[in-house]
Amino acid sequence: MFRNEMPRFEILSEGALETVERGWRRLVSEIGIQFDHPRALDLFRAAGCEVEDARVRFDPDFLLEQAAKAPREFDMRARNPEFDLHIGGDSMIFAPTQGPPFVRMGGVRRDATLADLQRFIMLTQTFPELDTPGGGICEPNDTALDSRHLAMNMSLILLCDKVFEGVPMSQVAAADSVRMGEIVFGGRDAIEQRPVMFANVNVNSPLRYDVRMLEAMLEFSVANQAVIVTPFLLMGAMAPVSVPAALVQQTVEVLAGVALAQLVRPGTPCVMGSFLSSTDMQSGSPAFGGPESAVGLYASGQVARRLGLPWRSGGGTLTASQSVDYQAGYESFNTLIAAFLAGTNVCWQSAGWLEGGLVTSFEKFAADCEILDLLQRQFAPLEVDEASLAFDAHVEVGQGGHFFGAQHTLERFRECFWRPTVASTENFERWKKNGSLDHAARASRRWRELLEQYERPPLDEAVEEELVEFVERRAAEVGDTISVR
Amino acid sequence: MFRNEMPRFEILSEGALETVERGWRRLVSEIGIQFDHPRALDLFRAAGCEVEDARVRFDPDFLLEQAAKAPREFDMRARNPEFDLHIGGDSMIFAPTQGPPFVRMGGVRRDATLADLQRFIMLTQTFPELDTPGGGICEPNDTALDSRHLAMNMSLILLCDKVFEGVPMSQVAAADSVRMGEIVFGGRDAIEQRPVMFANVNVNSPLRYDVRMLEAMLEFSVANQAVIVTPFLLMGAMAPVSVPAALVQQTVEVLAGVALAQLVRPGTPCVMGSFLSSTDMQSGSPAFGGPESAVGLYASGQVARRLGLPWRSGGGTLTASQSVDYQAGYESFNTLIAAFLAGTNVCWQSAGWLEGGLVTSFEKFAADCEILDLLQRQFAPLEVDEASLAFDAHVEVGQGGHFFGAQHTLERFRECFWRPTVASTENFERWKKNGSLDHAARASRRWRELLEQYERPPLDEAVEEELVEFVERRAAEVGDTISVR
């Protein structure tokens, strides 16, 4: 697990942070948030909030009090203890893209299937840069809707022993996810003691939580799982066309969600989510990797630290590009390095994202894992001591020589520099001889190699049997049959 | 001209900076630098330095005293006053790639010609992101060697009215460059009063200045032009395989060069150059855009500010990639954003660089100018005031609505977000209908459009006549004929 011990890039002055705070205090107390769920409204009413129809107006200090009940940092348990996670502080964890209905493999773009999802889960297991598959790396469109969450969870649990994400699409999906966590980790007490799954809840921005998300959130909160509350803000569509306004709205939406989780169960581990980008105002299409989203990330990190909550960034390796090209490279890199600079704790959408999140690309998955690896090296502190100055190498080489054969070099050449896995430094003649492959073509080789290296992690037979029984029974109850082996 | 008013990303502690300082003090006093030029050695000897054969060992404090004579910030005069430059402080200026022997246009890679250089100069005139063409954006291989500098300078002066770079390849080239500056700007006094050209001098690292570079440097210094002293350090080849060691070596090489310029003419404007990257230790090829060069840039900025010198970064948009692909996108972006984060003043190699600097690419020129534009927007301070919070937009839109038609949006939609010039946010169907063009293909359109928009800037007829006469006479003196109109 990576620890980001580099400085944070902070662009907001104390005065600017105070202006943002005045902004969210006003927005939450004067406009408030809509919750489409009677139980949520009951909980807020019982806590003394002002509820009018489905709208809740908040005392800002009440929200801060609730948020203070969430832990600043917490631990999560994986099937393989080597992959246990620490959330918050200096730690940064990485998940691939979540949610796309399509996949791209080489030149072919098509509907995603369960087999694709399983390939991506296997790649997540194999790529060391990734700490969790999250949940739906792509949408398994060929599975029945009512039992889809069972097929997804089963794949996540059987094929990968990293922390996974429960399915937050409905109360039923959430409850089944929690139950499967109980089966794997030894019962309710065990998972309540230390969370074993993420639950990412998207707000229906602006300022609204819909019933499905709320049902799932209540289910995960009561089981003490890690709730990520994520406003999904494309400025110009779900938020005003101003980064400060989006920051204010994001803060309001997060605090209201976190407060609800704390009312359900004080101490529920919560993560401030963010997904802040802009809209191309000519086409209405979402834009990614531009200056507004980077600036939004820098600033969001400061807001999260001020609130004392671990922080999930949306991005990751976001891009609007349709192919794995120069645009995909720079937009993805800009979003990802912004997450590092801003001190993200949970970095969602970090591998595979293409076409504004409509596509998970196999090639981009491998390409993005390379820049994840690069930035993990880049954000390791530079050790500066006498030995690092290599005075003896200068004594040996002198003026006008070269360091290829110096003792200092020979002792370090294997480890001294980061090594790419896809990028090429070949000279032109060799590159041409080897087929003039661009980065996307080389990335295609890379993910295929990694998939071949995949080994299914061991799972206790009795646990697997119990999971299979559970999943088959639940599928039958909703009228589906499911094949899970 | 861009001013970078964002915070600097500083990764070295005070203690680390002191260790680096101890390192360069030791290196310069115990190992010293080789100068292959009698006049340079005479100057150092006269100043009391320890000269043994061609090697000079320095008192570190002497070097700091000399460096303190160089201005911390200075102004430069362009043919068009709109393009005058301020060097140092918060200001950042951008030049395209310098030096490649090859060009790439679409799928064709070939020897560069004078016509290519002229196209790139015209593009530099047209792209507003670029402040100076520098000098040899590519090598005009089809011109005679002895008069090449005349052809280059003539193209730079006639086709572009931004500050240019004199040719530093020899004493003759430097003297002719200075003379042409005198013709354009009204005589020796005028150019001595305010420099009109850059002179980039590469050190023959490690720890050596060769005769050609020294001759050129002496010529430019005596004329008070802006001397950039640039160690060219590929760690593993010209420097030890350690970033701190490279920083120490870079500091030593810069200070020695700056001291020489100050001995020639106290107060000569000098810029600390840097070009720090690593070698692929398997192939021996240079690598670009990786973590070591980014970390080297962050740290170099801190060293430059400690020395009180304006700072030129090598990169820019560096990449080892052979084509305008994902690798080119992320490597270029990593180097360029590092320059912004580190507070570069003079950003060389910012457009067109491909194949480790062997190729200037027309497509990458346009692609790189887009990310230059992006980062200039990203590094503009975020204004956070009451108006920016857009409270009224929330009053208008309420919960669950959208902001497309909000008054706040309608008033701002044209200017609220950065707009790309090459990148695409088209949805898949439209993108496919429009030919499924990747970023490189779209960049090809972009530079052709900009070249069509080019207009030759006006030049006083008498000045042009005098330049032509000078160039024709000088070419004849070296036995060449030259066509300059």
Image (spheres, coloured by chain):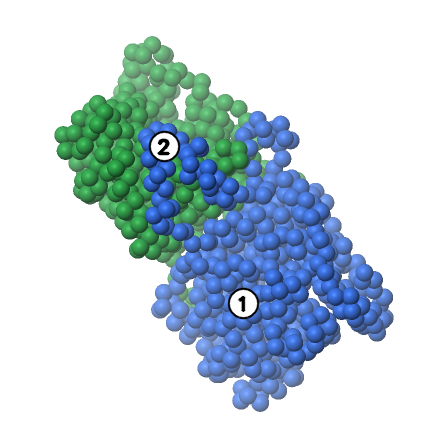
Chain colours: A blue, B green
Of marks 1 and 2, the one in the foreground: 2
The Cα–Cα distance between marks 1 and 2, rounded to whole angstroms, is: 47 Å
How many circles with numbers are drawn on the protein?
2
Which secondary structure, mark 1?
Answer: strand
Instruction: Residue A262 in the image: state x and y as whole percent.
Output: 56, 80
Q: Quadrant of residue B122?
A: top left
Q: Is disc 1 surrounded by few (<14), some (14 to 19) or many (20+) residues within 10 Å?
A: many
Is A300 above or below relative to B349? below
Instruction: Residue A56 in the image: state x and y as whole percent.
Output: 56, 82
Q: Quadrant of the C terminus of chain A?
A: bottom right
User: Along the horizontal axis of the image, is B199 left or right of B65?
Assistant: right
Q: Quadrant of the N terminus of chain A?
A: bottom right
Q: Amino acid at mark 2?
A: Val
Q: Is residue B306 visible?
A: yes
Q: Amino acid at mark 1?
A: Ile
Residue that carries the numbered disc 1 in the rendered image = A87
State which chain disc 1 sits on: A
Which secondary structure, mark 2?
Answer: helix
Q: Is disc 2 surrounded by few (<14), some (14 to 19) or many (20+) residues within 10 Å?
A: many
Instruction: Residue B302 in the image: state x and y as whole percent.
Output: 32, 50
1 or 2: tag closer to the N-terminus: 1
Residue that carries the numbered disc 2 in the rendered image = A397
Task: Return the residue found at the far top.
Answer: B479
Is A135 above or below relative to A227? above
| Residue ID at (38%, 49%) | B298
